[in-house]
Amino acid sequence: MAKAKVSLASLYDKLKAGIVDMFMIMMPIQYFTTYILVGSASEYRQNQSFILLATITYLLVLFLLLFFKGQSLGYKYLGLHLRNKNGKKASLFQVFIRLVLFVLTFSLLFGILFPFFRKDRQYIHDLFSNTLVLKENK
């Protein structure tokens, strides 16, 4: 059986994976929070604590998937894997730091534009957590 070739994931693949994650993970959480816990969309929008709860739940689910499987749903769909710089499974600390830095840097325009100034197209959260997003080329 031939081994699959692995390369760094493109920015486009990471973006698509993020969009898939938002729809497959965040949307059900938002729906549950809005209509089951709160009761209506207008009440949900007025209560910031439920918005925070939904966001923390999304990040927790993402954290657990990336730590235990090395893939979120979007990563799995696109054949992407989160690994450390040695190609092994990312540690608990690396995944945690990566998500914290992801939230911080993506809240700033600089964090979104950062990879366009690097040859390897790595985001800040990948650099500081010593992780790579790899793509299986079949």
Image (cartoon, helix red, strand yellow):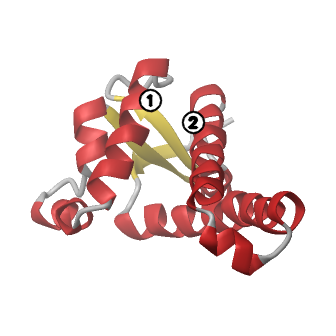
Task: Give residue 12's quadrant in the image.
Answer: bottom left
Label 1 with label 2: CB-CB less than 8 Å: yes
Q: Position of residue 134 (x, y in %)?
A: 44, 45
Q: How many marks?
A: 2
Q: Secondary structure at mark 1?
A: helix
Q: Is residue 89 above or below residue 125?
A: above
Image quarter in which the C terminus is found: bottom right
Residue 2 in view in this figure: no
Q: Residue at 56% x, 43% y: name it.
A: 4
Q: Amino acid at mark 1?
A: Phe
Q: Going from the N terminus, do you reach mark 1 or mark 2 first? A: 2
| Residue underneath mark 1 | 96
Q: Secondary structure at mark 2?
A: helix
The residue that appears at 56% across and 61% down in the rendered structure is 48
| Residue furthest left in the image | 117
Residue that mark 2 sits on: 63
Q: Quadrant of residue 110?
A: bottom left
How packed mark 2 is, by other alpha carbons closer than 10 Å (few <14, some 14-19, many 20 or more), is many
Q: Where 66 falls versus 53 (above or below)? A: above
* Residue 74: x %, y % from top left: 63, 58
The part of the image, by quadrant, that contains residue 65 is top right
Image position of 91 with respect to 45: above or below: above
- Along the viewing direction, whichever of 16 and 95 lies nearer the viewer: 95
Residue 132 horizontal/vertical position (percent): 36, 39
Q: Is residue 133 visible?
A: yes
Cα distance between the residues tagged 1 and 2: 7 Å
- Residue 129 or 104: which is nearer the viewer? 104
Residue 1, label in figure: none
User: Looking at numbered disc 2 in the image, what kind of residue is underneath it?
Assistant: Phe
* Residue 52 spot, x, y in % from top left: 56, 53
For the residue pair 102 and 119, the one nearer the viewer reads as 102
